[in-house]
């Protein structure tokens, strides 16, 4: 659904969000398009449609960059983290004051400085004062479960970080059909700032699976991955290979975290083989476009690379390529703690 809306209304879509209660929120800059109403009626959950919000999601990254630049260039600011929230139509900042301004710097003052840089009254600007350092400098890190953006609303999900057999080279895993695009913009999950252009280094799509690798751009690899929205954990083990009824969970940028069990092994979809089919249904709220490449795991054990939907007699289910295929194809392992 998110993929369809982004492709159909790239300059009108304010945002698409899966709510905690399982419902879906969809917003538009102007009036709600009739086609969007028709698409919403096809979803098996309650959908809240909001129109005339005055902003489009495609405008928010640029506004965030301008906010970041305006605050980072201020001599009273020691450090700053920024992000945007399409649900609220806001760009937000957490600022650490410099030593000379720590006692006098006010969030309202910084907001007054930043608002003219945004130059869009429909986008909210929120500034908060905090203490440094801002986390553990997560802006420098790249990990599994992050977003790989391709422009025009298209995106995939990153897999685990990988390390070569020699131990000298590290790569970012994803699905092969994602890494066919020469470069992407990797972004961490909220609240972790940090993004970088990453470049495709290896792609395999065939009888052994659907896997690929990007470099890390300007970021540093870490052995953690996003296992749920904004939640990180270490990858401690690489599965030697899944078995029927193994419990597994997946995380993807479109539908988030879903869990199930392994149903079938060595499933072939067209010319792509070696797929593991799970009990997780392939629907717009459980496993969908944009989730491709995301991590399959069981606790801290790395299992697979999300491929997409696989059809069985009883329906369509979420499928993955086992992570051990990275070694079979390119002599890389999941980088574990």
Image (cartoon, grey):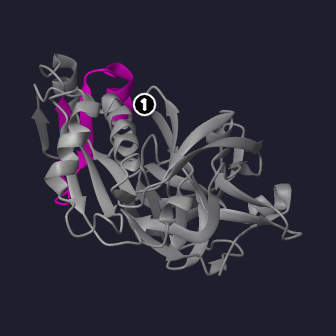
In percent of the image, x 14 and y 51: which residue is there?
A: 108
Please tell me how crowded label 1 is: few (under 14), some (14-19), or many (20+) other residues with Cα within 10 Å: many
Q: Is residue 180 above or below residue 218?
A: above
Q: Quadrant of residue 68?
A: top left
Q: Is residue 332 above or below residue 18?
A: below
Q: Quadrant of residue 65?
A: top left
In percent of the image, x 62 and y 56: which residue is there?
A: 219
Q: Quadrant of residue 3?
A: top left
Give the side of residue 63 with respect to residue 198, left or right.
left
Q: Secondary structure at mark 1?
A: loop
Residue 218's x, y, as percent?
64, 51
| Residue topped by disc 1 | 153
Residue 169's x, y, as percent?
81, 62
- Farthest right residue in view: 166
Residue 323's x, y, as percent?
68, 63
Q: Is residue 110 magenta?
A: no
Q: Is residue 22 magenta?
A: yes
Q: Is residue 59 visible?
A: yes
In percent of the image, x 36 and y 64: which residue is there?
A: 98
Specify the segment rendered in magenta.
1-28
Q: Pick whichever, 55 or 307, lies toward us.
A: 55
Q: Is residue 204 above or below residue 167?
A: above
Q: Pick whichever, 1 or 229, lies toward us.
A: 229
Give the side of residue 263 with respect to residue 12, left or right.
right
Residue 240's x, y, as percent?
72, 75
Q: Is residue 190 visible?
A: no
In percent of the image, x 58 and y 77: which residue is there?
A: 301
Q: Is residue 28 above or below residue 208?
A: above
Question: In the picture, which quadrant includes the N terminus?
Answer: top left
Question: In the picture, which quadrant includes the C terminus?
Answer: bottom right
């Amino acid at each position: 659904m998110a993929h369809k809306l982004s492709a159909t209304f790239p300059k009108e879509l304010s945002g698409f969000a899966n709510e905690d209660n399982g419902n879906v929120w969809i917003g538009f800059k102007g009036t709600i398009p009739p086609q969007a109403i028709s698409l919403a009626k096809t979803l098996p959950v309650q959908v809240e449609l909001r129109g005339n919000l005055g902003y489009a999601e495609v405008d928010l990254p640029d506004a965030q960059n301008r906010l970041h630049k305006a605050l980072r260039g201020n001599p009273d600011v020691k450090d700053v983290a920024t992000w945007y929230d399409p649900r609220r139509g806001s760009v937000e900042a957490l600022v650490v004051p410099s030593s000379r301004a720590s006692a006098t710097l006010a969030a309202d003052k910084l907001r007054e400085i930043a608002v003219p840089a945004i130059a869009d009254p429909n986008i909210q600007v929120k500034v908060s004062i905090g203490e440094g350092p801002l986390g553990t400098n997560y802006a420098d890190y790249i990990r599994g479960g992050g977003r790989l953006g391709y422009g025009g609303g298209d995106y995939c999900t990153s897999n685990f970080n990988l390390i070569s057999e020699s131990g000298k080279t590290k790569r970012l895993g994803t699905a092969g059909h994602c890494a066919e695009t020469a470069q992407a913009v990797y972004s961490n999950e909220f609240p972790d700032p940090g993004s970088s252009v990453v470049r495709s280094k290896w792609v395999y799509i065939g009888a052994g699976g659907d896997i690929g690798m990007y470099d890390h751009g300007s970021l540093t690899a870490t052995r953690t991955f996003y296992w749920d929205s904004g939640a990180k954990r270490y990858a401690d083990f690489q599965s030697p290979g899944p078995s029927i009824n193994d419990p597994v969970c997946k995380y993807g940028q479109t539908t988030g975290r879903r869990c199930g069990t392994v149903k079938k092994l060595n499933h072939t979809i067209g010319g792509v083989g070696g797929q593991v089919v799970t009990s997780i249904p392939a629907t717009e709220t459980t496993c969908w476009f944009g989730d491709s490449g995301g991590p399959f795991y069981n606790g801290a054990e790395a299992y697979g690379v999300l491929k997409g939907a696989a059809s069985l007699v009883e329906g369509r289910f979420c499928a993955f390529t086992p992570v051990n295929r990275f070694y079979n194809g390119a002599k890389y392992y999941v980088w574990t703690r």
